[in-house]
Amino acid sequence: MYIRFLQFSVCALTIVIVYGIKQAKNGNISLHKKINLGVLAITAVAVIGLLVTLGMGFEYKEMKIAESLLNIGPESMEQRILIHRFFSAPLFFALIVTAYSGAKNKVSLHKKSVKYTAFFWLGTLITALLFF
Ligand code: HEM
């Protein structure tokens, strides 16, 4: 099921992105750029995959709560999706600002945007693991 695949790949990507941030902290900026650009490229593929499944007519709100991985959250799947979107939609824009500022060496903007990216990334990951 695509949703399980997404859950496990985002967990794996989180480990890789933390490792990528550690490289920046250690001053290894060139490795930091390579790793985090790789993570962003994979994330873009995952988002496109999600859009393709939507285009194919898959109704995510029809997912059964009882079939969720951890199943912790509101009783209504529509409400779960809404809460998840509260994190995932801003994450999309935060990632763009982080990648743009990193690529353009706008260090102060990069460091500021990283805080938002981290917050919305974790919110997206946690709600996805609890709800779906
Ligand atoms: C979601 C993706 C990313 C995250 C979470 C992230 C996070 C960070 C963090 C936390 C730092 C600061 C390290 C410190 O305090 O010294 C940093 C520095 C830096 N990042 Fe990123 N980064 C991301 C993507 C990128 C990308 C895509 C690029 C470029 C293509 C990039 C380029 C840089 C550069 C050049 C610095 C060094 C700034 C300096 O001179 O101190 N980053 N990044």
Image (cartoon, rainbow, N blue to C red):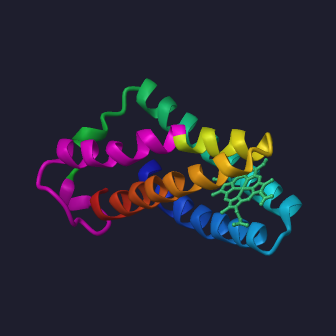
Residue nearest the viewer, comparing 80 with 25: 25
Quadrant of picture, ligand 1: bottom right
Q: Is residue 29 left or right of residue 55?
A: right
- List x then y, in percent, for residue 112: 58, 52
Say if the magenta span includes residue 81.
yes
Q: Is residue 98 left or right of residue 60?
A: right
Say if the magenta span includes residue 89.
yes
Q: Is residue 31 left or right of residue 39?
A: right
Q: Is residue 4 visible?
A: no
Count of numbered badges drawn on the protein: 0
Residue nearest the viewer, comparing 99 with 48: 99
The residue under the point 39% across, 58% down is 123
Q: Quadrant of residue 60?
A: top left
Q: Quadrant of residue 47?
A: top right
Residue nearest the viewer, comparing 129 with 82: 82
Q: Is residue 60 visible?
A: yes
The residue under the point 79% across, 61% down is 32
- List x then y, in percent, for residue 68: 28, 61
- List x then y, in percent, for residue 65: 20, 55
- Quarter of the image for the C terminus: give it: bottom left
- List x then y, in percent, for residue 9: 56, 59
Q: Which residues are magenta?
A: 65-93
- Establish if 47 lies above or below 34: above
Q: Main secondary structure of the magenta part?
A: helix
